[in-house]
Image (tube, rainbow, N blue to C red):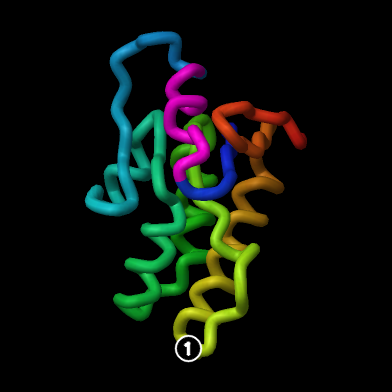
Amino acid sequence: MIFITGGQAQGKTEFAYSFFQDKDIAAADGRCSGYGEALEAELILHLECYVLRLMQEGTDPAVFAGELIEKNGGAVVVADEIGCGIVPADAFAREYREKDGRVCQKIAAFSDEVYRVICGLGSRIK
């Protein structure tokens, strides 16, 4: 697994696609794709959106992260960093931020490579 993280609009998606060298691949997008698609896709975008949707449905996103690792351990996974800003006043938003951070830690720990992308430049941190 390869995990790519960074701030919003920093070039993570383009950086992720560079691992596939113009190959036509199956990608799952957490903003709109189903959970099953993420378990089969070569590229998973917006992991943080999967986490939010699962929480809104009352499901523990850590379970999804475990399934992702178990069933799709060769994927490239992309997630926005959401825990670096001001602590939200809303309790659900604080819980989301916490759980998203835990899911990203789990994915990063399993991954063979981890990158942080800023201004379109990827720095390997693992």
Q: Considering depth in this image, is 119 or 25 the residue closer to the camera?
A: 119
Q: Inspect the image, locate mark 1, and give the three-letter code of the amino acid beneath it.
A: Asp
> Is 108 inside the magenta-drawn segment?
no
Q: Residue at x 35, y 34 (%)?
A: 41
Image height check: is 83 above or below 18? below
Residue 52 location, x and y as percent?
A: 39, 67
The answer to whether residue 78 is left or right of residue 28 is right
- In the rendered image, the quadrant that contains the N terminus is top right
Name which quarter of the figure residue 124 lies in.
top right
Q: Quadrant of residue 111?
A: top right
Kindly report the secondary structure that dominates the magenta region of the rendered protein: helix
Crowding near the residue tagged with mark 1, few <14, some 14–19, many ≥20 C-alpha atoms within 10 Å: few
Near-viewer residue (28 or 94)? 94
For the C terminus, the image quarter is top right
Q: Is residue 75 above or below residue 98?
A: above
Position of 46 compared to 89: left or right?
Answer: left
Q: In the image, is residue 17 part of the stretch drawn in magenta?
A: yes
Q: Which residues are magenta?
A: 9-18
In the foreground, 11 or 51: 11
Residue topped by disc 1 = 90
Up-down: is 63 above or below 14?
below
Q: Position of residue 76 (x, y in %)?
A: 50, 32
In front of the other: 120 or 14: 120
Quarter of the rendering containing residue 56: bottom left
Task: Say which element carries label 1.
Answer: loop
